Image (cartoon, helix red, strand yellow):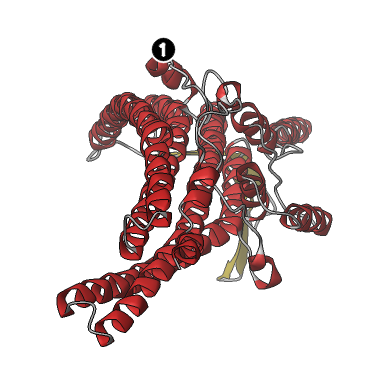
């Protein structure tokens, strides 16, 4: 009896040690205070100098609401529009939940499986039998550190992916902002073209009734007016579409959709910045490349785990305690192992190797595509700047000069009112083309920022300086091309 008692006491001590070890190991896996969001916040601040907020409490929601209302109180700049989108875009808020999911997987990987307990009470033939079994998954104890490292890499990868989504929303908002302002500005010029065309068509009808104009000339003026009406309708629809796209990105509804935009696009920088070694810079900064690298490393680690467990897939350790009818109690343990008789794990290893090679090739593709995007975006940036500069410094000033000379000739009765109106229409078209070229530059600059990872080596603000007073700007050209004023002078 003494040996039995000592054995029972020893077994209980061992079970207590095992149980305490399980509790201590499981307690090591805990959730962080920020849920990984501080990494996203820091990366966003470094790349685009913007703040982001993960709305998880009523206080967070109230702070965001107050900030958005304050930003919408005045005409939005492009930076303000991006701030509103990063704070108020609900799709972006949903993306932040990926951090919680990834961290939960990490914590779960660091916690051991719960032990099992089974109780059997059988009775027959006047006898009864009681069995008690405590089961513990020993494999989870062995592989917990490796599984934790794998999920840790995935958590870090998720942080990069979430940050990349933040930058994507910022880029899309910048594009939508420039598109919306340009469409709004172009719409005003389309309205001026319509006014000019309407004046010409009305004057043509009166002259045709008086017998001073041919039917062909009248039809030409009427056709131009009809085209101007159609062009105005298309311009109005484009303005609505671009504004609604910006509204969606900023997550606005209700009274907030009445936000104001500036009347004109930002002026073209006085000088263009030339960048060197953008490709290596992008390889270091782009988050999709960093995330792809982390994914490849995680797959490689998973391949090592697969190789480790190819023969040992199930390993259960059980503690037994049975009561026999004669009052004798039995204690001991049971080990359950899967025998690799038919499945030697080769298929799992081959699958893991194929997944790893797939990840390597996708990582290489991401890097190749990133380099190409940088070269393409930089070429577009250079071309769009030169094109906008050509319109600003050459075409628009020449159109203004022609308009002034035609006004002098009209005052001297050397040209007709129709020639004056036709020149006014052409000048408006040129100014509209300048708006389109200016829009193209800001979109190209946005695409270049995206291609290099959210920021440029040198800030574009360093290149923005007041333009030369001798160089006509878009507002000057707009004043010179006002067809309504020209028509008044012509009459």
**Residue nearer the viewer, 227 or 31:** 227
Q: How crowded is the residue under tag 1: few (<14 C-alpha within 10 Å), some, or many (20+)? A: few
Q: Seen from this angle, which residue lies furthest bottom?
A: 209
Q: How many marks?
A: 1
**Residue 237 seen in render:** no
Residue 100 lies left or right of residue 412; in this view the side is: right
- Residue located at (50% from left, 66% from top): 488
Q: Seen from this angle, which residue lies furthest front?
A: 412
Question: As displayed, is residue 223 above or below residue 85?
Answer: below
Circle 1 sits on which residue?
Answer: 276
- Residue located at (28% from left, 85% from top): 210
Residue 457 lies left or right of residue 308; in this view the side is: right
* The C terminus lies in quadrant: bottom left
Question: As displayed, is residue 152 above or below residue 403?
Answer: above
**Percent from the top left, x then y, of residue 419?**
31, 59
Q: Secondary structure at mark 1?
A: loop
Q: Quadrant of residue 25?
A: top right
**Percent from the top left, x then y, of residue 142?**
53, 28
Q: Quadrant of residue 206?
A: bottom left
Question: As displayed, is residue 182 above or below residue 193?
Answer: above
**Residue nearer the viewer, 78 or 430:** 430
**Percent from the top left, x then y, of residue 307?**
34, 26
Residue 150 lies left or right of residue 237; in this view the side is: right
- Residue located at (62% from left, 33% from top): 44
**Percent from the top left, x then y, of residue 148?**
56, 31
């Amino acid at each position: 009896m003494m040996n039995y008692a000592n054995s029972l006491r020893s077994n209980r001590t061992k079970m207590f040690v095992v149980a305490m070890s399980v509790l201590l190991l499981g307690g090591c896996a805990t959730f962080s205070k920020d849920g990984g969001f501080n990494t996203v916040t820091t990366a966003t601040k470094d790349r685009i100098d913007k703040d982001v907020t993960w709305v998880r409490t009523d206080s967070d929601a109230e702070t965001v609401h107050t900030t958005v209302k304050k930003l919408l109180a005045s005409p939005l700049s492009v930076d303000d529009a991006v701030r509103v989108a990063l704070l108020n875009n609900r799709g972006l808020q949903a993306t932040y939940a990926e951090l919680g999911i990834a961290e939960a997987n990490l914590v779960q990987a660091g916690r051991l499986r719960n032990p099992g307990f089974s109780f059997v009470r059988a009775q027959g033939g006047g006898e009864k039998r009681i069995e008690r079994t405590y089961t513990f998954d020993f494999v989870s104890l062995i592989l917990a550190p490796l599984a934790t490292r794998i999920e840790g890499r995935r958590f870090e990868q998720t942080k990069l992916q979430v940050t990349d989504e933040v930058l994507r929303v910022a880029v899309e908002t910048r594009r939508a902002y420039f598109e919306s302002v340009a469409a709004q500005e172009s719409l005003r010029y389309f309205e001026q073209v319509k006014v000019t065309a309407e004046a010409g068509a009305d004057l043509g009808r009166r002259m045709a009734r008086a017998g001073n104009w041919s039917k062909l000339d009248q039809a030409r003026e009427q056709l131009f007016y009809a085209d101007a009406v159609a062009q105005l309708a298309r311009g109005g629809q484009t303005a609505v579409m671009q504004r609604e796209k910006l509204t969606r990105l900023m997550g606005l509804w209700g009274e907030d959709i009445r936000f104001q935009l500036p009347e004109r696009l930002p002026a073209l920088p006085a000088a263009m910045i030339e960048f060197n070694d953008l490709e290596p810079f992008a390889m270091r900064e782009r988050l999709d490349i960093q995330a792809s690298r982390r994914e490849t490393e995680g797959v490689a680690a998973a391949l090592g785990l697969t190789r480790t467990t190819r023969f040992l897939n199930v390993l259960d350790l059980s503690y037994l305690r049975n009561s026999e009818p004669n009052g004798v109690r039995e204690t001991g343990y049971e080990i359950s192992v899967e025998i690799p008789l038919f499945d030697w794990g080769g298929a799992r290893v081959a699958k893991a190797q194929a997944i790893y090679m797939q990840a390597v090739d996708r990582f290489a593709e991401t890097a190749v595509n990133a380099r190409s995007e940088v070269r393409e975006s930089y070429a577009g940036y250079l071309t769009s700047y030169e094109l906008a500069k050509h319109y600003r410094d050459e075409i628009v000033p020449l159109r203004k000069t022609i308009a002034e000379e035609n006004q002098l000739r009209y005052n001297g009765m050397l040209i007709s009112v129709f020639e004056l109106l036709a020149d006014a229409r052409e000048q408006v078209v040129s100014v509209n083309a300048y708006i389109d070229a200016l829009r193209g530059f800001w979109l190209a600059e946005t695409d270049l920022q995206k291609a290099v990872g959210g920021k440029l080596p040198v800030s574009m603000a360093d290149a923005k300086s007041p333009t030369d007073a001798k160089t006509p700007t878009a507002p000057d050209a707009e004043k010179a091309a006002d067809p309504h004023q020209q028509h008044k002078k012509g009459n």
